[in-house]
Image: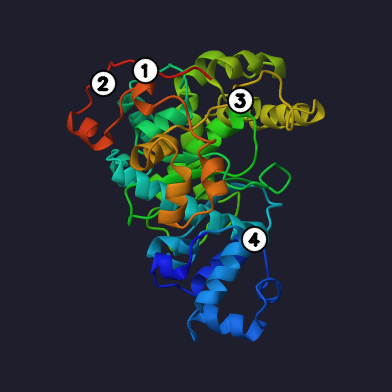
Amino acid sequence: MGSPDEDARDFHGQRLTALREVFGLTQTALAERIEVSQSFLSQVERGARPIPDALVVAASGEFGLPVSFFSVPPTPLDVAQATFRKTARAGAKDEQRLLRLYNEAARLFRTVSEQSGYIEANLPEPADYDHDPEAIARAMRRHAGLDDEAPVLNATRCLERFGFGVVDRLDEHGHGGRGHTGISRPSRLTSRPLVALVEDVPGAVKRLTVLHEAYHWIADRDRCSPIASTRSPEEHHAFRFAAAFLLPEEVVRGRVSESLNLHGYLPIKADYGISVGAIIRRAHDLNVISSQRYRSLSIQLSSQGWRTDEPVEVADERPLLLSQALSQVYGSQPNARASHVLGLAPGWIHRWTHGGARDTIENSGAVIDFAAARRQGSRREHASLGLSRY
């Protein structure tokens, strides 16, 4: 793990708070594990007393963290307003843990993305599109080289080409049942946005979720208060953007009708990689089907068990950008070095990069500079995406 003398760094007591929240511990529980009193630990976390070197070594060994974890200074990005794709059953305790993990993953992505020279994300300004998520989705599809009815072959790779980082295994315990699917922390203080997936979800859900969180980065960079509920206008707009990006309005109007039965939605799912539940909701949002038909199909969806196990598998998508940038900065076996330099647990890095990806972004289509594309006016880019199919 190294020693404080070897690292010669300033240590921050607030990092003990970060440690507690990552591991889901109370002050009392952490104090017992590192053999100090709860009152002493409280003073260290508040900055009332300095963090002793011996305490850093003890915590480092107890939790498998590099000593450098405790030298990471706080930044304004750590307290930016968070957005989640979640259900009503999602718990506050889980959110605290996920926010801490997200901060660590976002710091990793910002560092290696910048040091590797990868493009910064030039995100569209919602005001330029009258804050219309459908219009923003159309613009981004156009700049990605997609025509009006083309499927998005790989949503994750498409976002990476816009400069987004994607992590799809943020939490080792993210295996379903807790209600959180995606997380982001939008802010204008960085041009290297990260979206993270929490739960192990089907491919169609993953595609919609990464785009849902990408929209929060576009629309909510100035947010200073939490989104009120899962049914808020902000969440509805994020869904509209993600669904419009995956399933253009022209396709819905051409292939969905009031009389289309539940199984008739499956070919659309197969062609566009979006769940039947999301297609039904999108058709209703566009007034292609009535509210009565929407309710009927939703009931059928539940009775068939499709809310948890839909037919037609959409293959998993794996991010590449973080792994590639990490290797470019730290070499062919980067985890140990990055762990020491950046103060991250090696297991986190391994999980967030799937142990290293074999492909490269360069082999998956050209990067997309949204701002440069806009300056060219409405002329479309005709270059092929060159992305692997879902």
Q: Secondary structure at mark 2?
A: loop
Q: Is the residue 4 above or below the residue 164 in the image?
A: below
Q: Position of residue 27 (x, y in %)?
A: 66, 75
* x, y percent for residue 292: 69, 30
Residue 281 is drawn in which quadrant?
top right
Amino acid under disc 4: Phe
The disc labelled 2 sits on which kind of residue?
A: Arg
Query: Label 2 belongs to which residue?
Result: 380
For marks 2 and 4, give the one nearer the viewer: 4
Q: Disc 3 on helix, strand or loop?
A: loop
Comes first in the chain, label 4 or label 3? 4
- The residue lying at 39 percent from left, 22 percent from top is 364
Q: Earlier in the sequence, mark 2 or mark 4?
A: 4
* Viewer-proximal residue among 232 and 43: 43
Does residue 200 lie above or below 341 as drawn? above
Q: Do tag 4 and tag 1 residues touch (Cβ < 8 Å)? A: no
The Cα–Cα distance between marks 3 and 1, rounded to whole angstroms, is: 25 Å
Q: From the viewer's perspective, is the residue at label 4 or at label 1 nearer?
A: 4
Q: Position of residue 285 (x, y in %)?
A: 55, 33
Q: Which mark is residue 23?
A: 4
Q: Does residue 161 appear to the left or right of 49 in the view shown? A: left
Label at residue 289: 3
Whole-number angstrom distance, CA of label 2 to CA of label 1:
9 Å
Q: Are marks 2 and 1 in contact (CB under 8 Å)?
A: yes
For marks 3 and 1, give the one nearer the viewer: 1
Label 1: which residue?
Answer: 147
Lower sequence index among marks 3 and 1: 1
Name, please, the residue furthest toward the right: 303
Q: Nearer the viewer, mark 4 or mark 3?
A: 4
Mark closer to the chain start, 4 or 1:
4
